[in-house]
Every structure is written in structure tokens, then in C-alpha cells.
Image (cartoon, grey):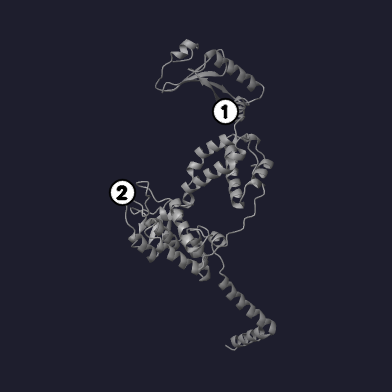
Amino acid sequence: MGNKDFKFDQKSIKALKAASQTLTLSDPKTPGLVVRVTAGGSKTYYFIYRMGGRATPKKWLKVGTVDALPLVRAQELARAYRTQVDSGEDPGEVMKAKAVIGKTICDLASQFELNYVTDLSPKTQEDYKRIIKLHILPHLGKIAIAELDRPQIQAWHSKISGSRTANLSLAVLSCMMTQAMLWGLRTEGLNPCSHVSRHPEIPRSRDIRSSELEAIGKALKALEGSHSVWALAAIRMSALCWGRISEVLGLRRDRDCHLDEGYAVIREHKTSRNSGPKTMELAPQAIDILRALPEQKGNPFYFPSPKVKDGPLTRHGVYKTWRAVCALAEIDDLHIHDFRSLAASEGEAQGVSPKTMAYLLGHSDPRTTLKHYAKVRKGKASEVASQLASNISAALDGTQVEMESKTTTSRNSR
């Protein structure tokens, strides 16, 4: 159907039927106004315009659907849009700006969780949602997205108790602000979270002592029968293979573990989106634990959930058992995650290369292992300090010089 054969009025537009391809008809009385009928039968009014003359591309601005908007009203809106274009204003951008007005951080959080957080790992999703719920929305939720500024953020950040919690909350809010700019909910420019002073964080320096390992071992044995066999085994596995507890709990019987070869493939982990699957080395002691675990019928996981038929045991279920272990062992400041630091520190003391330890812990960068996990053992440091002091003392007394002189003479005589 051509535009010449069509009478552009309310009755004719209502009578339009779906065709094999999209049909676009122009209103001869209102420049820029068209009605578009898709192959599916939907009918919509659009205003077509250019900003800057024929050299610029056409823009399509949705005016409204035929069912919801009378033709007379669509023509009025199109004429108003034409006036804006003639005065140099982009009606599409004006509409976007009006849509943003009134939207709050609470609205942004909903969009952020739906369109961004869902693409993150399950553990990260849980952390982001918890931070948004507990620390961002109660204080900033009612503030308009466009009005949130650095002084407000600095004041909010200073009120959050716990340096690490405050800094993590600031990082999540910064990510939300970046997405708000990308989604057109805030004018693009400097992120308001930039240059907000972070709280200093004291790195965790806790190391597990041999006496504590012995106490933990005794507690694990004492709790057999009163706690889940899978939770107790998961704690032992964390101590023996140094994987994150979520990685241990995610091990499946049907695909992940190659016990005869001594390794497991971890498909979902903290950095799997960027680095893909990683290998977890399984020591003979860890393999013995996995072979001895009872299998729950219909559940593919080595550590099955008692509540979800085909799901894994949750971290919270293991933490409950871990608290019981620590109480019995009379230890009050130890985390399951500290077994990873124990492995890194022991490797450092034994002279294992940082690259090897990074591989065993699943770090793509050895600097992460050295900075956050490997701790210098006091005994090892004392030994090195004594040796260095002896060398320096000998040099001060002239002994070291004589030794070097003898060594040089010996080399020259060869």
C-alpha cells in the first residue's frame, strides 16, 4: 500500500492489518509523523527528525501506540517535537532527561541487580546484594541519581563501621555510578566516588600454629557423629587442597574429579569469567577423603545438600560446623580461608617459588599470593636475621674481608 492510496485518519489507521513486512506511512499534514505497522500487527506512531541537516542521520522518536494514543494527540506531540528541533533542542534527549528526573538510587539498585549483578559469580552476586541492602539503600536510597555528589558519598562512607566493609561498599557504589552513566541515568563525566578517601585496611596477619592444627584435628574427630560427615570432610579438604570453600563444595562426581590422575577441574570460581576453568591439585590425603565420602543417591556432588535434592552443601552449613570445631579447640579468631594462607606461608618458608604457590592456590598473578597470603614465619625470619647479622658483624670486625681476600687469592691461583 502506498502513501498516496492511504487516507491518514483515525479510522483508516485503526483498520490497518499486518502485512508480510513492516509498513511505514507518513502523515501529509504533520511533517515527521509516521505510523509503523509491523509484520506482527503492532501499530506505533513515530516522529522522524534530523539534528543538523541532511548530513546527519535520521532519528526515530516513539510517540505512542495507536491503541493508546488518538491521532489528534499524536499530531500535537509531533508538532511540539518539530518546534524543539527548529529551536536546536533534541526532543529525544529532552525526553531521556525528563525520564531520569525523579529516579533514585533505589531505582538504580533495582536495575543494577537485574542487568549487571546477574552476570557475576554466585558468591559475588550474594556479596553485592548484601552490601546494597545493608549499607547503600538505607542511607542513600532516596537520593536522586543525578544529585548524588562526592560530599554526600564521603559522609556516608565515613559512617560505615569496619574499614573493609566501608571500602567494599564504596567500590559497589562506584560500579553502580559507572553503570548509571552508561545507561543514560546520569550525565557522563567524573564518577562521584572518585577521590573519596578510602579507609586504611590493616592486612590480616593471622597464621595457624602447629598446636592449633593439632587441636582442630582432635575437634574434627570429636564431632564425628554429631555433625554432618560432609561438613567435617569439607573442612579437612580445605586444609589439604587449599581451594576456596565454595570450590570444594562444588566438586561433582560426574565430571570434575580425576582421582586416579590426582586433580580436579574447577569450572566455576572467583575469576572464571576472565581466566576460565582452573586445576586443583589433589594430594593423596585429599583423594582418600573423597573416595571415603558416602554418596547421596541422585545428587552428583561429593558434598551434597541435606535440603536441596541435587544441590551442594552451602557455605553456611559448613561454617556452622566450623564454629563448633573452633569452640571445641578453644580458637576464636580463625577462618577456614586461613588454610590458604597457611599453605602459602609454609611454601614461602620451604622456598617454594611464588609462581608454583600461585598455581596451587589458583591465583593468576603470583603477586596476589605474595601480597595477601604468604606470611613470613617468625622462626624463619629470626634465622635469616641471625645469619645476616653474623655476616655484617664479621665484616665490621674485618673477618669477612679476610675471607673474601682468601677467596679471591684462591680463584686467581687457579
Residue 298, disc:
2
In terms of secondary structure, where does tag 2 sit?
Answer: loop
Q: Residue furthest bottom?
A: 413
Callout 1 environment at 10 Å: few (<14), some (14 to 19), or many (20+)? few
Q: Residue at x 56, y 15 (%)?
A: 73
Residue 82 percent across, percent down from the top left = 61, 19
The quadrant in which the N terminus is found is: top left
Amino acid type shown at disc 1? Pro
Relative to 34, does residue 215 appear above or below in the rendering?
below
Residue 18 percent across, percent down from the top left = 41, 19
Residue 59 percent across, percent down from the top left = 56, 26
| Quarter location, residue 378 | bottom right
In the image, which is nearer the foreground, mark 2 or mark 1? 2
Amino acid type shown at disc 2? Gly
Is residue 349 something that shows in the picture? yes
Relative to 95, does residue 150 appear above or below in the rendering?
below
> Going by the image, does 5 lie left or right of 182?
left
Mark 1 lies on residue: 57
In terms of secondary structure, where does tag 1 sit?
Answer: loop
